[in-house]
Image: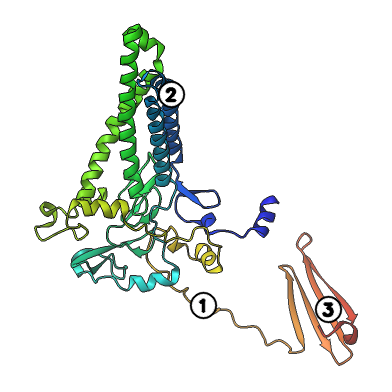
């Protein structure tokens, strides 16, 4: 009841009927994949380690670092590290990372007709839709693949994520740690998140070592470990983070320098050893610095899905009427319904032509009623024939009803 009243006041939004495997928060303003629990777990780990740093290390360094007042810089740097880490984490995991909108039913047939004709010996079924399309892109030929789920030609560098059930522009990989796919719109935030975590982890490890060394001069190494156990826990957690994240950050630094994605590197899209000596990367700039400037400081692309827009009749009809364009697994366009086959002729002889002034109404398998209209006075004769199967004897009951046409109308 409350939901129905809410829908009367607030119309349905497109994100409420979104075909992909995504979750939406804050009325569609934030979105993520189904693995949002891992994102929350990573955020909790960052907050807990930062809280231990402020409770033990930062307070100790503010008091014991000489000259007095210089130690204030340690908690300030810790606050900045916490802020940027959480900001880049949620920006990576809670925005549209570059989803390509699925084709409407009217667009499927037109786009499918633009595919390449495959040779007879390619193993393609006769009449099946095209699977590839060759286009000229940035000075070289690129073969586009037809997505049977989204029903569209995937643009260059795009790929389909089976977990999120969406096609992503400039797809890199699906990251469970951030609870989202890493693609065109959030790749810069993902790289900055990795770099920030690695730098912050190294900074906290340095602060932990400083605290233990200064405390050991006053009370000994064993007593320092007992007095500041938080520093030991921070050092272990930060060490694990640095070991895992720093390697991943270095790998993506190398990929940005080459202007490639993780998906392209795994497939060897621009590898001359796998694709031939004539292949080259058309997205690479003149040097590595320009590649980094484009990835980190380039224009931010807009979202291609209107997830917070009102639910239109066309969108609703596409979701309810033709599901082939919203999450189906086949790209074959639906054929028009076939005309019903003619009814075979009845071998029994046709019945006699009925009287035009009479109408027979079938009531039950064992009963029939004949209505006859005579004259202009509206005399209707109703004959009911019934057979009692229990006695095996049929009896006729005739009832004559006189209806006034002026009062009841002609039957």
Which residue bears the numbered disc 1? 344
Q: Dot 3, how many residues are within 10 Å of its Cα: few (below 14), some (14-19), or many (20+)?
A: some
Which residue is at a point 44% across and 53% down the rendered structure image? 20
Q: Which residue reaches farthest bottom?
A: 376
Residue 275 in percent (x, y) is at 14, 56
Q: Quadrant of residue 402?
A: bottom right
Q: Quadrant of residue 7?
A: bottom right
Upstream in the sequence, badge 1 or badge 2? 2
Which residue is at a point 39% across and 43% down the rendered structure image? 88
Which numbered mark, 2 or 3, is in the foreground of this view? 2
Which residue bears the numbered disc 3? 382
Which residue bears the numbered disc 2? 52
Residue 354's place in the image compared with 70, above or below, is below
Q: From mark 1 to mark 2, how far is it between C-alphas?
A: 85 Å
Q: From mark 3 to mark 1, how far is it between C-alphas?
A: 34 Å
Q: Is residue 411 visible?
A: yes
Residue 133 in percent (x, y) is at 26, 68
Residue 245 in percent (x, y) is at 30, 35
Upstream in the sequence, badge 3 or badge 1? 1
Upstream in the sequence, badge 2 or badge 3? 2
Q: Dot 1, how many residues are within 10 Å of its Cα: few (below 14), some (14-19), or many (20+)?
A: few
Which residue is at the front of the view, 241 or 229? 229
């Amino acid at each position: 009841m409350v939901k129905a009243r809410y829908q009367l006041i607030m119309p349905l939004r497109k994100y409420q009927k979104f075909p992909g495997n995504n979750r939406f928060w804050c009325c569609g303003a934030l979105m993520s994949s189904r693995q949002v629990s891992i994102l929350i777990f990573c955020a909790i780990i960052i907050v807990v380690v930062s809280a231990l740093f402020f409770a033990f290390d930062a307070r100790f360094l503010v008091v014991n670092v000489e000259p007095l007042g210089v130690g204030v810089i340690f908690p300030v740097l810790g606050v900045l590290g916490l802020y940027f880490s959480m900001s880049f984490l949620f920006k990576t995991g809670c925005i549209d990372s570059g989803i390509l909108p699925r084709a409407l039913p009217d667009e499927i047939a037109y786009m499918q007709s633009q595919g390449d004709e495959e040779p007879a010996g390619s193993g393609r079924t006769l009449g099946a839709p095209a699977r590839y399309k060759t286009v000229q892109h940035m000075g070289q030929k690129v073969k586009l693949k037809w997505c049977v789920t989204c029903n569209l030609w995937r643009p260059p560098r795009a790929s389909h994520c089976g977990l999120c059930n969406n096609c992503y522009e400039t797809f890199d990989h699906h990251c469970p740690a951030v609870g989202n796919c890493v693609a065109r719109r959030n790749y810069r935030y993902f790289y900055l998140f990795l770099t920030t975590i690695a730098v912050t982890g190294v900074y906290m490890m340095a602060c932990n070592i400083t605290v233990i060394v200064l405390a050991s001069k006053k009370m000994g190494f064993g007593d320092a470990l007992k007095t500041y156990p938080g520093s030991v826990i921070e050092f272990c957690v930060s060490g694990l983070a640095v070991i895992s994240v720093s390697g991943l950050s270095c790998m993506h630094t190398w990929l940005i320098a080459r202007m490639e994605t993780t998906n392209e590197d795994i497939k060897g899209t621009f590898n001359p050893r796998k694709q031939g000596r004539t292949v080259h990367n058309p997205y690479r700039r003149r040097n590595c610095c320009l590649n980094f400037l484009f990835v980190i400081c380039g224009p931010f692309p807009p979202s291609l899905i209107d997830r917070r827009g009102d639910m239109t009749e066309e969108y609703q009809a596409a979701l309810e009427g033709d599901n082939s364009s919203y999450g189906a697994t086949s790209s074959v366009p639906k054929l028009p319904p076939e005309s019903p086959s003619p009814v075979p002729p009845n071998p029994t002889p046709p019945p006699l032509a009925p009287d035009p002034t009479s109408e027979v109404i079938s009531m039950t398998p064992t009963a029939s009623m004949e209505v006859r209209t005579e004259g202009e006075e509206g005399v209707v004769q109703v004959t009911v024939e019934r057979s009692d199967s229990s006695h095996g004897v049929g009896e006729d009951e005739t009832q004559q009803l006189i209806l006034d046409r002026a009062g009841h109308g002609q039957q």
